[in-house]
Amino acid sequence: MTHTVSTWNGVVRVLRGYPPRTAMHISKGILPHPRTFGMTGSIGMPEGQLADFRRVLANGQGLHVKDFGSHYEAHIDEVHPDVNAIEHLRRDAPGVFIAGGTALGAVIGKSVGTTANATLLGAAIGGLVAALLTNSSEE
């Protein structure tokens, strides 16, 4: 998605009209550097970006900007990681959340199990629980 905006606040206003994680392409030179908007350096899933920047929004959501050198890509996360890191992973990075649940299940299975398959069973249960949690809605 491409829109004409002149401020980072304008980017936020446009993105609020779309579902979370909808990416907006912004040519460099149109807006000042994300740090001028109070964004801080962060990490994100590697997708070829040079840097990631984030800012907590008033409602606990987060503006996430990826710097690709020639352009920025911005989206709004449902939950900013500084507000609740686990909930951010569950809602905004479910693949990472499920991988973490699988790894945790494997560790628990290995530590409490007495059979050779305990680690595998723990991993399967951890991954399944994490997958179910990513599909549950918060009321």
Image (cartoon, rainbow, N blue to C red):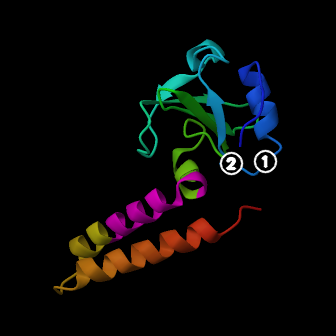
Q: Residue at x 57, y 16 (%)?
A: 33
| Secondary structure of the residue carrying numbered label 1 | loop
Asked if labels 1 and 2 touch by Cβ distance under 8 angstroms, the answer is: yes
At x 41%, y 30%, the residue is: 50
Q: Residue at x 75, y 52 (%)?
A: 19
In magenta, the rendered stretch is 91-105
Q: Position of residue 35 (x, y in %)?
A: 56, 16
Q: Distance from label 2 to label 1 (Cα)?
A: 6 Å
Q: Where does the image place residue 25, in percent across and percent down from the top left?
A: 64, 36
Which percent across, then down, holds residue 36?
61, 12
Q: As rendered, which of 33 and 30 lies closer to the eye?
A: 30
Q: Position of residue 55 (x, y in %)?
A: 62, 28
Residue 26 or residue 35, whichever sits in front: 26
Name the image quarter holding the N terminus: top right
Q: Amino acid type of disc 2? A: Thr
Residue that numbered label 2 is attached to: 22
Determine which quarter of the picture holds residue 107. Answer: bottom left
Element type at marker 2?
loop
Q: In terms of secondary structure, what is the magenta stretch mainly?
A: helix
Classify the position of the C terminus by image quarter: bottom right
Q: Residue at x 70, y 49 (%)?
A: 20
In magenta segment, residue 15: no
Left or right: 48 in relation to 118 = right
Reading the image, the residue beneath label 1 is 18
Marking on residue 139? none
Q: Left or right: where does residue 17 sit relative to residue 38?
A: right
Camera-side residue of 117 and 40: 40
Image: 92 above or below 55: below
- Where is 79 relative to 52, above or below? below
Quarter where residue 125 is shown: bottom left
